[in-house]
Amino acid sequence: MTLPLMKNFVNGEWIDSSSTTTGDVWNPATGEKIASVPYGNREDVDKAVKAAKDAFWDWRTTPPLTRARYLFRLKDAFEENFEEIARVLTTEQGKAVDEARGEVRRMIENIEHATGVTTMMTGYTLEDIAKNIDCYGHRQPLGVFAAIVPYNFPGMVAWWFLPYALVSGNTFIVKPSEQVPMTQTKIFEIIEEVGFPEGVVNMIHGSKDVVNGLLDHPDIKGISFVGSTPTAKYIYQRCGATGKRVQALGGAKNVVTIMPDANIDAAMPSLITSFFGCAGQRCLSGSILAPVGDIADEVKEKFIAATKAMKIGSGLDESVAMGPVGSAAHKEKILGFINKGVEEGAELLLDGRNFKVDEYPNGFFVGPTIFDNVTPDMAICSEEIFGPVVSIVNPKNLDEVVELVNSRQYANASCIYTQSGATAREFKYRVNPSMIGVNIGIAAPMSFFPFGGYGSSFMGDIKGHGREIFQFYTDMKVVIERWF
Ligand code: NAD
């Protein structure tokens, strides 16, 4: 059987990549190939940039409210296709379909937030900055922007950026992860139906060559990147070298703290989702579980019991809480980390290495894995594993928690469970990560707040979505004016 080959969407049309090199797209639950994706080249980039550049002036001079109306139509079309997008997403990424639905909902929320352009893109004015002289600043779009996105959120992440760039008058190119190209392809079919002007929004498939083509292209004004920290650093440096605006969101190693006064039973469902939802492949996933002082034994006992109660299998099965990991290669990487933890002397309380799902013997499953007696210097406590592997560290007090959190190179998110407002305040005040959960296991800012971390988790200054993103996609032009 011939597998479908993904096409690029450029200038309002579906076109073949100029490259003949392709990669495989897998269903991680069944371990079967389901599509092929072109590993595009600079010719593909040039076509997309030309289309986006040619479309810029007409789009830029379209009133913001008219631009927003395209997004209103897109929102309705996404609602109509909601379930289908979620199912394509689970099929190629593996996450539980209900999580995929959550992801689609977050995409729509970003569209909804971006339609507030007429209040969020405004500038400001001051009369009489000197005698008879007035001053005002307004925000102008810049041209062509692009987003380069990861495999773990095949739908949502591009939509942390795209609606804001478009509604503020720029034109856009999305480069999906080559591992999961089908979800954005489905989304672009919907974009085609909504009928944006040609060239305003484009998608090209590929990997490094397409990324390098985008980074080097003189007509691209800025890059929004989300992925691992090594790639984020590369993107950040190369955008600096080529004079582009850049926001580069990287990896994570999130600590979840349980204080002795926490309500453990109430916390448990959110703890399980934090560590094992999306098979631990979220930049907001819990990775280090830190029960403080004597509460550790009770937390471990209840956490292990709740972990064992989770159903693991194909994400399309509505009763499944945890699906497979994204690829065979990633499964091997996670297993390597588990072996490393054993070698380093951590105590394996639950071993997910030989985990099998009977119905899907070829799926990329890793069972939930829990290590105890982990020390901060171990690889499983410092490096990003990005899988269903929990490292338990047992700090004595809040000072040790702060030391643990702030000594990790990543500083994306951190959560605390406590009944004490004073403890929560001290935690929020002293830890480095930028996204904080208090009695919340996944500290995910909604579209109207900024998304992004600190340290090795983020390079740049303006983060994903939130109000500030209008600054990333515009230049503030300031006019100083006098009339004789
Ligand atoms: P990745 O860095 O491998 O890939 C991300 C994107 O960069 C892809 O589109 C890929 O094609 C491209 N890319 C990869 N290697 C490249 C290279 N050498 N040169 C040029 N381009 C390259 O990341 P991934 O494995 O797809 O995603 C998982 C990572 O993303 C994890 O580290 C996770 O923490 C991170 N992530 C972070 C956030 C956040 O908000 N900070 C959100 C989601 C995922």
Image (spheres, rainbow, N blue to C red):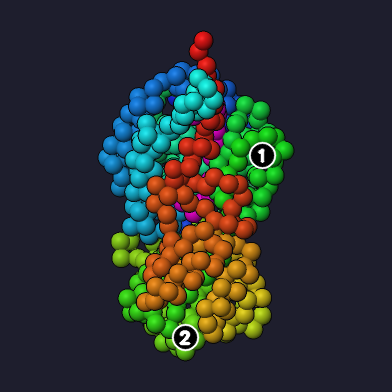
**Residue 253, horizontal then vertical, whole percent:** 56, 65
Q: Residue pushed farthest top?
A: 484
Whether residue 149 appears in magenta in the rendering, the answer is yes
Q: Quadrant of residue 274?
A: bottom left
**Residue 203, horizontal then vertical, whole percent:** 50, 34
Mark nearer the N terminus (2 vs 1): 1
**Residue 204, horizontal then vertical, whole percent:** 54, 34
Which numbered dot is residue 297?
A: none
121 lies left or right of 481: left
User: What is the count of numbered marks?
Assistant: 2
Q: Is residue 358 above or below residue 475?
A: below
Point 32% across, 38% down: residue: 75
Residue occupied by mark 1: 239
Point 58% across, 38% down: residue: 223
Callouts 2 and 1 close, C-beta under 8 Å:
no
Answer few, some or many: residues within 10 Å of disc 1's Cα (few below 14, many 20 plus, some between 14 and 19).
Answer: many
| Closer-to-camera residue (307/440) | 440
Q: Give, as a single range, the part of the protein colored magenta.
A: 138-153
255 lies left or right of 261: right
Residue occupied by mark 2: 296
Q: Amino acid at mark 2?
A: Ala
Residue 83 showing in the rendered view: yes
> Which secondary structure, mark 1?
helix
Point 60% across, 62% down: residue: 410
377 lies left or right of 109: right
Residue 190 showing in the rendered view: no
> Which secondary structure, mark 2?
helix
Whether residue 47 appears in magenta in the rendering, the answer is no
Q: Amino acid at mark 1?
A: Cys
Answer few, some or many: residues within 10 Å of disc 2's Cα (few below 14, many 20 plus, some between 14 and 19).
Answer: some
| Closer-to-camera residue (31/365) | 365
Q: Residue pushed farthest right?
A: 241
